[in-house]
Structure formats: C-alpha cells, structure tokens
Amino acid sequence: EAGVAQSPRYKIIEKRQSVAFWCNPISGHATLYWYQQILGQGPKLLIQFQNNGVVDDSQLPKDRFSAERLKGVDSTLKIQPAKLEDSAVYLCASSPTPSGNEQFFGPGTRLTVL
Amino acid sequence: AQTVTQSQPEMSVQEAETVTLSCTYDTSENNYYLFWYKQPPSRQMILVIRQEAYKQQNATENRFSVNFQKAAKSFSLKISDSQLGDTAMYFCAFIQMDSSYKLIFGSGTRLLVRP
C-alpha cells in the first residue's frame, strides 16, 4: 500500500514570495490533515479536511495561508506572501477514520524562507 | 485546553539497554487516545504505539511498551533492548474523542542510542 505522498520535499523562497505544497493521501482515506512543524517543536495542526469539506481550520493563518481539497483526494496548501517565521516542515497526514485516531504521515516539505 | 508535556528534551542510552521517555498530559475528558510517534532524522513520522484511555491494560508493541497512569495523567514509553535504529525524535500525542478530534503533540524528546 502506497503511503502519503508530498511534494516538493524541499523549497527555498524569499520572503513575500508565494509557495504551494501538494499532498496525495493514502487511497481511500477520507480525512486529510496539514501540520506545521517548526524546528524543535511538535507538529501543530493547521487544517483538517473530511472529503472535500473543512472540519477545522481554527489555527490556519487565513490572511496568508489557504488550502483546498477540491475532489476529496489530493490537497494543496498555499502560502502567500511568505514570512520568515513560516520556515518549517509542512506535514500532510491522512486517516481512514474521521476521528483521526490512526493517522499516517507523509515525508513532509521543508520550507526555508530567506 | 488540552496540553502535552515532554520534560526531557534529550536522552541517550547504550545499545541493548532500556530507556524510558516521560510524558504528561492535561484534559478534563475521559474518552481519548494517547500515542507515541517516532520521527527519525530526515524521515517521516511513524506511529510507535497507541493507548485507548478506557483500557486499563498497558499497550505493548514488541520492544515498546507504555506505562499509562490515568489518574496521574502520565504516559511514559519504555524501549527495551535499544537498537541503533531507535535513534530519533519521539513525540507524545493526545487526541480527544468527544469533541475536537485534534491531535496535539508534545515538544518531543531526542533519543540517541549509543553503540
């Protein structure tokens, strides 16, 4: 069974530029999550999707971050414009259950904002 | 608000020996799950072990076991017969089943297994 796929693996941008990350969850997993993991910290949930609907985006900085999951499968996370403090690893996870008590993580995208 | 605290930023252990990583959490609810995740250097996070709060028996997975003390809100991970491949960041995490379903992580413990 293929795992959660993410691309790109690494991205370096200048502040105020835009960037987008892509995630393909495990086949059949209706629940998808985006996490932000700042160096030295545990992951923090940014947004949770159930199929193509948003369940929780309370910690997403909506003035600069956006995410979509139009067909209920792949998802993209966008940052526009990026700030220095957005430097982090962005993790995508998926779960076969809406409760999320079994989450599978992708390899992450390491973003560096200069 | 739910919180997860890992008070040991770094630990090291000799290969083949046993090490225990500590975790405490805070919640007023009764229906939740606790997890230990492993994140090796430059590799993806994987689930090590999971504990359901309503189960009194401590979960075990091969060399990994937990000591779940519900009243004390403590959830420690014991790694027996440590192997070099156990070197990683270990995150304790918590998810509440009754409302938010949000996975909340601790700050992690970096474990180094010495040869």
Image (tube, coloured by chain):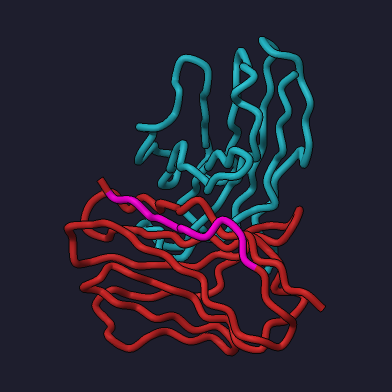
Q: Answer whether residue A27 is visible to the viewer in this image.
A: no
In the image: residue B85, left or right of residue A67? right
Q: Quadrant of the C terminus of chain A?
A: top right
Residue at position x 73%, y 28% in the image: A112
Residue B96 in sight here: yes
Q: Is residue B5 magenta?
A: yes
Q: Is residue A56 above or below residue B28?
A: above
Q: Is residue B96 left or right of residue B89?
A: left
Could you say which is closer to the camera, residue B8 or residue A5?
B8
| Residue B58 in which image quadrant | bottom left
For this orientation, the residue located farthest to the top is A16
Q: Nearer the viewer, residue B73 or B37?
A: B73
Q: Specify the chain shown as cyan.
A: A
Measuring from the top left, give residue A57's x and y in whole percent: 39, 33
| Residue at the outermost right position | B115
Magenta run includes residue A59: no
Judge whether A91 appears above or below B106 on screen. Answer: above
- The quadrant of the rendering that contains the N terminus of chain A is bottom right
Q: Which residue occupies 66% across, 86% down?
A: B17
Region in magenta: B2-11
Q: Residue at x 52, y 46 (%)?
A: A43
Q: Nearer the viewer, residue B72 or A36?
A: B72
Q: Position of residue B100 (x, y in %)?
A: 28, 49
Question: Could you tell me residue A40's position as x and y percent?
Answer: 60, 44
| Residue appearing at x 36%, y 50% in the figure | B102
- Tell me what hue chain B is rendered in: red
